[in-house]
Each structure stands twice: as structure tokens, then as C-alpha cells.
Amino acid sequence: MGSWGYGSEDGPHTWSKSFPAAAGKRQSPIDILTSSCTYDEELASKPLTINYQTEKDLTLGNCGYSLKAGVKAESYLSGGPLKHKYRLEQFHWHWGSANNKGSEHTVNGQMYAAELHLVHWNTELYSGFGEAATSDNGLAVLGVLIKAGKECPGFKTLAEAMEKVKFKGQSSTISSFSPQCLLPGNTSKYWTYDGSLTTPPCAESVSWIVFQECVEMSEAQLKTLRSLVCEDCPNAQQHNMVDNNRPTLPVGDRKVRASFK
């Protein structure tokens, strides 16, 4: 497995050398051009069902390229564009060095300060996350666009724990947390399309669901993300973890469907 990152020598433009899927035709993220989206009545009549349980011991970790939380509780996603039941495996963020960049998906060319991804795997077709991650209809990912604004109450608990995960490899446990609090108030309006993981191996196994409604995070909360460090040694030359977002890829002949007019 090749090494990868977001720098000039190991960034997204190099990934296909070690991860051939990265050069595929259904790669993510994309620019969601609203004038080209197709309203799908079936999506509107088949509500997206998000059934998240409270995590008793949520593990928050710095993996060197993102802030990631592993999930143990049985939280599920179904309905909407999905034909199967998917279980929440983990959630993580992508963010920029400034408020006008950082999200992976864009809407009509507009980039946001950050983006939250909640990653689910298909429990009806596959026996585990690893198998599902590289298989057809294996994953479903919720994308939440984040803009600078007022404080996000749901992120507050996470921000308080982030001092303990400043360096790569560090982790911290939060005694009680529900991922539900990170979602926008309206989850019935979204765009959906067939895509891929936005990090290597970039497997084309993802049903994407990107919400229309953004979530706001305060300047202070965004700064906590930007304060994380890519390296695992406090004495090494430190690089803040910023601009960890893959640029948008061509939509090609894919359809982007909307659950709303």
C-alpha cells in the first residue's frame, strides 16, 4: 500500500500511481451543479431514516490526515436512495486553512470551511466494513457542509477533547456522545449520486448523500481543527493539519438526483 497525503509530492494528483481506482470515472468529490440535478419523486416519497444511538465510549483520534471518531453502537441508515441497511462505522472531517475553503464537495462552485463525513457500510450484503469498503453498494456516506458562523453545540464536547489528540496517533475517549447532534436540522433535502471514497484507495463503492442545509461552526471551533498536527512527535517540525480536502472530480455521465425541487 503506497503512502499518500495532501502535499505537493504525495497529494491527490499522485494518488492514482499507487491506487488505480483514483483514476476511475465515478470519483468523489464533485461540484454539485444545482441546475443539472434531477428531482426524483421517489426520493421524496421514501424518507431517509437515520437511527443513531448514543455512544457510551466514543474514541476520537488524530490519524495524521484527519480527525476521526470510531463508532461501536448500532447506528443505522436506510431509506432515501438506499436499497439496503447501512451501519455507521466512523465519522471524520475535512477542513481548510481559511473559512472560504476546506470542504470536499462544492455547490455551484462554492466551497465551504469544512465537511463532515459519516461513513456507513452495507450490513445486508457484506460481513464487515473492510469487505464492504471495496465492493459494489458497499458504503453510504452522509456529507455535511460546514460554514463559519455560530457555535455548533454538538461539536462542543469534541472540541474540549481535542487538546488530547493534537498529535498523530493520539486518541481520547468521550463518555457519552450522539452523532445525531452533528447533523443539520433538515435531513430530508439532499443530493445523491454514485461515487467513491475521497481518500485512498478511492474505491468506487459509495452512495453519496450530501445535505442541502449547512451546519455552522464558530471561528473558535474551526481553529481547534486547524490546530491539529500531522506529525506524531511534539519535537519534530510541526505541520498543522489543514487543507486536507481532495479537489472536485468530473461528474461525467453520472446523474445527481435531488430529493427536493
Image (spheres, rainbow, N blue to C red):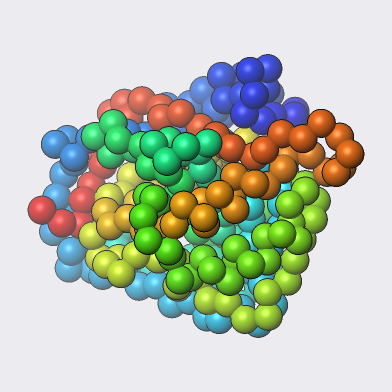
Residue drawn at the location 64% of the way across and 39% of the way down:
241
Viewport quadrant of the N terminus: top right
Instruction: Point out the residue furthest to the front here.
Output: 220
Q: How many marks?
A: 0
Residue 200 or 237: which is nearer the viewer?
Answer: 237
**Image height of 53 relative to 234, above or below:** below
Q: Position of residue 148 (x, y in %)?
A: 39, 50
Is residue 173 visible in the rendered structure shown here?
yes
Residue 117 located left or right of residue 108: right
**Image height of 136 relative to 160, above or below:** above
Residue drawn at the location 58% of the way across and 71% of the way down:
157
Residue 77 or 93: which is nearer the viewer?
Answer: 93
**Image height of 119 relative to 160, above or below:** above
Residue drawn at the location 39% of the way across and 36% of the way down:
100
**Image height of 102 relative to 51, above or below:** above
Q: Position of residue 250 (x, y in %)?
A: 36, 25
Residue 43 located left or right of residue 8: left
Residue drawn at the location 62% of the way across and 35% of the way down:
200
